[in-house]
Image: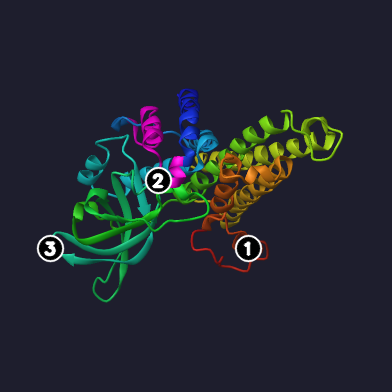
Amino acid sequence: MNQVLLDAARTTVPTLSANAARTEREMRPAPDSVTAVRDAGLFALTAPREAGGHEVNLHTLVEVLVELGRGCPSTAWVVGLSASTKALIPSMLSPKARDAFLADPDAAVCASGVPKGGHGERVPGGLRLNGGWAMASGSEVATWAMIIVPVADGAAPAAFPVLVPVSELTIHQTWKAAGLAGTSSHTLVAENVFVSDDFVSPGAKPSQEQVFTAGLVALAPMIGAVRGAQDVVAAAISGDRGPYATTYARVVDSPLGRFWFTEATRRTATALRRALLVADTLEALGPGEAMPVADRSELRVELSTAARECREAMELLLDLHGASGFSHENPLQRFWRDVAVGTRHPFFTPYITAEDQGRVTFDVLPTVSLTL
């Protein structure tokens, strides 16, 4: 099954690539790209098998997202965030909500834990929602939204995960960014939306695997983006264009040119190995097994380092290609901007990751990261 899904992902890459410019321009995955992903069964990656999904392990999830990122990082980002949220939701909701959510295993889901005035009010039978929730990646292609709703519930304010149909919300196009512009990471707005108690989670804490999955699904499309950039650069430097004002007919005739490209591919491969190491480590955990904080810190370092390696590889590729790679018609500049933005996801924040590692090393606890 894993190879079948990888092959399916590869078949979508030409469609995603052909529609990447449109995806960026319209700030959402292009309809043809969404259809290709859905027809390949890739919106059902983490849906339970009994509901018609694939219930893939983290290793396969990472590999599939890398392939999709090679064609369009924005679309891969949406698929990954949908997959991680879809894996989390069934364990947090009532049987009624779970059945409604899993009725279509191919449905996309978005999520936001960034309230922008968004809040809930206790009413008989559920919550009344008002306000906004920002950075809901995939908002315009999703059927469902999982949002974290602050509720002033008596003397102790709390926040609850709430599942709500996107059709009951308004989408404000607020995500206008230099990179990953096509992720539809917009703001969801509720106006007196009622959500029954069945669709309100009591607030179960995500497992360590679920927390790290969020980092993996953000990193994998970035590794794919660098691979997509490698495809562009490989074609350019092996063609009939030589380095400016040199005796070389082609860039690849230069030994250091070949070395530069090899260095880029090596760093990308290393970043992927780090991501798969984290995925396999998490998969090896037994039910309910918790990792020591030192191990969790080490995994966080692996992902943060992989993000940096993606940026380093991209810089080498840009050097090789030259300034023409920044032309709006050249997909290289889009891969570059996507990687620059995506590898700055809060999960990878390098100075916090390094600080926590130092705290663990010298037993200056607790760590400062609340998700570690």
Q: How far apart are marks 3 and 1 (CA)?
A: 46 Å
Q: Is mark 1 on a helix, strand or loop?
A: helix
Earlier in the chain: of badge 3 and badge 2, it is 2
Check if residue 42 falls in the magenta segment. Answer: yes
Q: Where is residue 326 in the image (x, y as percent from the top left)?
A: 63, 46
Whether residue 288 is visible here, answered yes or no, is no
How far apart marks 1 and 2 lie (CA) works out to: 31 Å
Identify the residue at horizontal 65%, vertical 40% (top origin).
268
Q: In this view, does 246 lie to the left or right of 40?
A: right
List the residue tagged with mark 3.
Answer: 124
Tell me the magenta residue range.
Answer: 22-49
Identify the colour scheme used.
rainbow
Please report whichever mark, 3 or 1, sits nearer to the chain's N-terminal start: 3
Q: Is residue 242 above or below residue 173?
A: above
Disc number lying in front (3 or 1): 1
Judged left or right of residue 201, residue 305 is: right
Q: Where is residue 11 in the image (x, y as percent from the top left)?
A: 47, 25
Contact? badges 1 and 2 (CB < 8 Å): no
Residues under labels 3 and 2: Cα distance? 37 Å
x%, y% of residue 201?
A: 28, 55
Q: Is-magenta flag for residue 125?
A: no
Q: Disc 3 residue type?
A: Pro
Q: Is residue 61 above or below residue 360?
A: above
Which mark sits nearer the N-terminus, 1 or 2? 2
Relative to 78, 167 lies left or right? left
Q: In this view, does 131 lie to the left or right of 6?
A: left
Considering every residue shown, the one lying at the far bottom of the view is 155
Q: Position of residue 150 (x, y in %)?
A: 31, 66
Q: Which of 322 and 156 is in front in this view?
A: 322
| Residue type at tag 1 | Tyr
Tally the numbered discs: 3
